[in-house]
Each structure stands twice: as C-alpha cells, then as structure tokens.
Image (cartoon, rainbow, N blue to C red):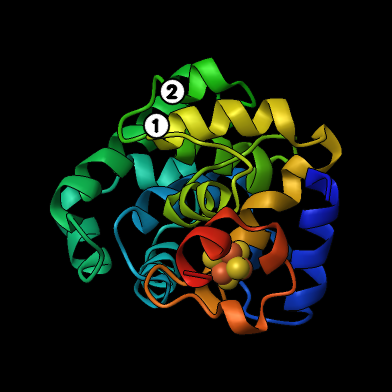
Amino acid sequence: MEVDEVISAIEKMLKSDGKTVLRDLKERGKDPFVVLIGTILSQRTRDERTEDAVKRLFERFKGVEDLAEASPDEVAELIRGVGFYRSKSKSIVEVARIIRDKYKGIVPKDMEELLKLPSVGRKTANCVLVYGHGLNAIPVDTHVHRIANRIGIVSTRTPEETEMKLREKVPERLWIILNDLLVSFGRSICKPIGPKCEVCTIKQECNYYKKVREK
Ligand code: SF4
C-alpha cells in the first residue's frame, strides 16, 4: 500500500468517530486567534478541560484587544483545570499583546513568525496554520508520532523528525487532514496502550502488528 492508500483506509475505518477539539473549533468558525489560544491551552491537557477553558475564557474576553488588557490572575482563574494554567495565563496575555502590537491584531500565517510567540512550538504553530488558516501543514502530537512510527511510514525519535519525514512522504493535499485523522484514530483504535489491531484494516501493512502481534 502507498501512504495515501493507508490514509484512505484509516479514513474509512473511522467513519463518524470522535471529533477532535481543534476540528470542532474550526468547524464552529472560530478565528485563528481562538485556535491559537485554544492550542496553547490544549498542551498537556485533556480535550474536555481545554474545551471548558476556551469557552470560559472567550465568554469573558471577546478577542485580541480584550485579552491583551486582561489580568493574568483573572485569566488563571478562568482556565484553572488545564495543565500549567498559571504559566499559560501569563503566556496567553503576552501572546495577545504581541498579536495586537506587532501584528495589528492578526495572527500570522507564517511559521517563523508564529514560532516567535511565547508557548508556541512547531506543533502549536502547525495547528494554527491548519485549523486557523486552512493552510497545508502537519501538526505532530503524540498520536501522530506514535501511529506513523507504528505503521512504519516513518522511523523517528522525536515529533519534529516525524513532521519532517511526513512532509516528504505524505502527498501535500493530505497534510491538512492528517492530524485530525490520526488523533481520532489514536483515540479510538490505535490507542497508546492496547491498540485494537484485531479490528484494524491496515494490520497487514503495519510494522508494529507484524513484529509484536504476530509473534
Ligand atoms: S495494526 Fe494495530 S498498531 Fe498497526 S495501525 Fe492498526 S491498530 Fe495501530
């Protein structure tokens, strides 16, 4: 199977399975700033907690201008429940100030500029490009990293290496769906512990299955 066939087979397996928080933000027409802040909040945090924090935060603060003037202590109370909420509260107020002052209130569409923002690494920047701006990019989180390595599409040690290899191997037209697809697949079938290989239609293509499960 070619990589695009593997991706298509995963799509078929999922059908209507679980919506990811980032896809939900995108489908609800959220602007790139909400996606940016939502992605920072989602770092090391469960989806339900991220969703609650995003909702509370943007009910109180309407956008860049509002959040740029916010007190980090008030923000911390609103996002309490997400991982590292105290340091994130400072970061997101700072991010809002930078977007307001340096970028005239508009979230950059450029990886290099996004990486200059506090608490923004490649995964978060790629999420903003895909889910905020609808551009071709590959956010690599733990699901994407694990699954791409299990199947054998890549053989890498870090998410950054995985991103670079996937950019080489996956046709660009599929980049934009890859994160959402593999996050859903990782939650429902190719789980971190105890993947459901018995129901997986690509097991004959999967290195993990061949090495570990057929022993
Ligand atoms: S066979 Fe198992 S490890 Fe391989 S992709 Fe499917 S669920 Fe994941």
Q: Amino acid at mark 1?
A: Gly
Does residue 15 appear to the left or right of 144 in the view shown? right
Does residue 42 appear to the left or right of 74 in the view shown? right
Residue at 19% across, 59% down: 76
Q: Position of residue 25 (x, y in %)?
A: 61, 63
Q: Amino acid at mark 2?
A: Leu
Q: Which mark is residue 115?
A: 2
Q: Quadrant of ligand 1?
A: bottom right
Q: Nearer the viewer, residue 76 or 122?
A: 122
Residue at 71% across, 64% down: 204
Q: Quadrant of residue 182?
A: bottom right
Residue 81 vertical placement versus 182 (above, below): below
Q: Nearer the viewer, residue 68 or 55?
A: 55
Question: Alpha carbon of mark 1 to alpha carbon of mark 2: how far?
Answer: 6 Å
Residue 200 vertical placement versus 171 (above, below): below
Q: Which mark is residue 20?
A: none
Density class for disc 1 (Cα within 10 Å; few <14, some 14-19, many ≥20) is: some
Secondary element under disc 1, as helix, strand or loop, is loop
Residue at 51% across, 15% down: 112
Residue with the mark numbered 1? 121
Residue 171 vertical placement versus 70 (above, below): above
Q: Position of residue 164 (x, y in %)?
A: 57, 25
Q: Are marks 1 and 2 in contact (CB under 8 Å)?
A: yes
Q: Nearer the viewer, residue 12 or 3?
A: 3
